[in-house]
Amino acid sequence: MLETLHATRYVTPLREGGSLPAIVEADDDGLYVLKFRGAGQGRKALIAELIAGEIGRALGLPVPRLAFMLLDPMLGRNEPDYEIRTLLESSAGLNLAMDYLPGSITFDPMANNIDTRLASEIVWFDAFIMNVDRTARNTNMLMWHKKLYLIDHGASLFFHHQWETASDKFGGPFAAIKDHVLLRVAENINDASQKFKKILSKDLIQSIVSLIPDEWLEGEPFFGNVSDHREAYLNFLMKRLESSSIFEQEVINAKANII
């Protein structure tokens, strides 16, 4: 289970993020990066962040700790910026937060070395969750205390933005992997596959999907109820895992085409 915290102070926006995430203080006196349900892709981005982040953590990848965070819209009553104030008001209720890594710097593939094993595992993970947002232009990786961390998975699992065609995607290749910032050093995709398939059981994936709050699943017109909506995530991920040889071959092919 994820811990549920209460936001007690809005500290500052992180304007490099398109959906205006923010650093907030919580009732445990810790600082967190808060992702708002009222921003951008709304609840779907939070669902992707939650599922991808917890799968990554279960696989042993360096993903900051996640937590649910309750937001009182009155927290922004004195915020002079209209956009931020509106975002806070529209995000009342349950949101998603991750540990803030103070002093961290953006991963630079030219300056930061990464071993081929970890690179391969990250590439496999991103191909599995269909993460289009780990490019050289925007790595969504941080260096903190000389350790690599993976952040910002809200753009992954993009199939759920159009459930009508989701079944066409679980077994398909993932062409965007050709732009992955770590593809060049991902030498052990088959090893990563064998390791992760031993971990990603149906029970594990189901336990992660069960974390999605009901209120984030309500109102999806393609499903008659929340249970069916939740089950669809489990079914998609299991089918994608079963057909992983397709996206694994896509990784191998893309790497072979690197000049």
Image: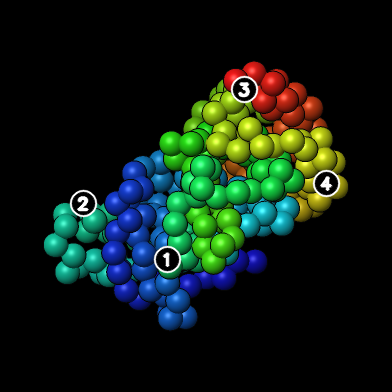
Residue at x 56%, y 62% (from the top left corner):
146
Residue at x 47%, y 65% (from the top left corner):
101
* In this view, 183 is above or below 63: above
> Closer to us: mark 2 or mark 3?
3
Q: Position of residue 247 (x, y in %)?
A: 71, 27
Q: Residue 60's image quarter?
A: bottom right
In the rendered structure, which disc, 1 or 4, sits on the residue that comes first in sequence?
1
Q: Along the horizontal axis of the image, is 64 left or right of 29?
A: right
How many numbered discs, if any?
4
Q: Which residue is mark 1?
A: 103
> Closer to us: mark 2 or mark 4?
4
Q: Position of residue 233 (x, y in %)?
A: 65, 41
In the rendered structure, which disc, 1 or 2, sits on the residue that comes first in sequence?
2
* In this view, 72 is above or below 107: below
Real-space Cα distance between discs 3 and 1?
Answer: 33 Å
Residue at x 22%, y 58% (from the top left corner):
85
Label 3 with label 1: CB-CB less than 8 Å: no
Q: Along the horizontal axis of the image, is 86 left or right of 137?
A: left
Q: Which residue is mark 4?
A: 195
Q: Along the horizontal axis of the image, is 202 left or right of 44?
A: right
Name the one closer to the observer, 102 or 131.
102
Real-space Cα distance between discs 2 and 4?
Answer: 45 Å
Real-space Cα distance between discs 3 and 4?
Answer: 25 Å
Real-space Cα distance between discs 1 and 2?
Answer: 26 Å
Q: Residue 29's image quarter?
A: bottom left
Under mark 4, the amino acid is Lys
> Closer to us: mark 3 or mark 1?
3
Q: Residue 175's image quarter?
A: top right
Q: Which mark is residue 258?
A: 3
> Helix, strand or loop at disc 1?
loop
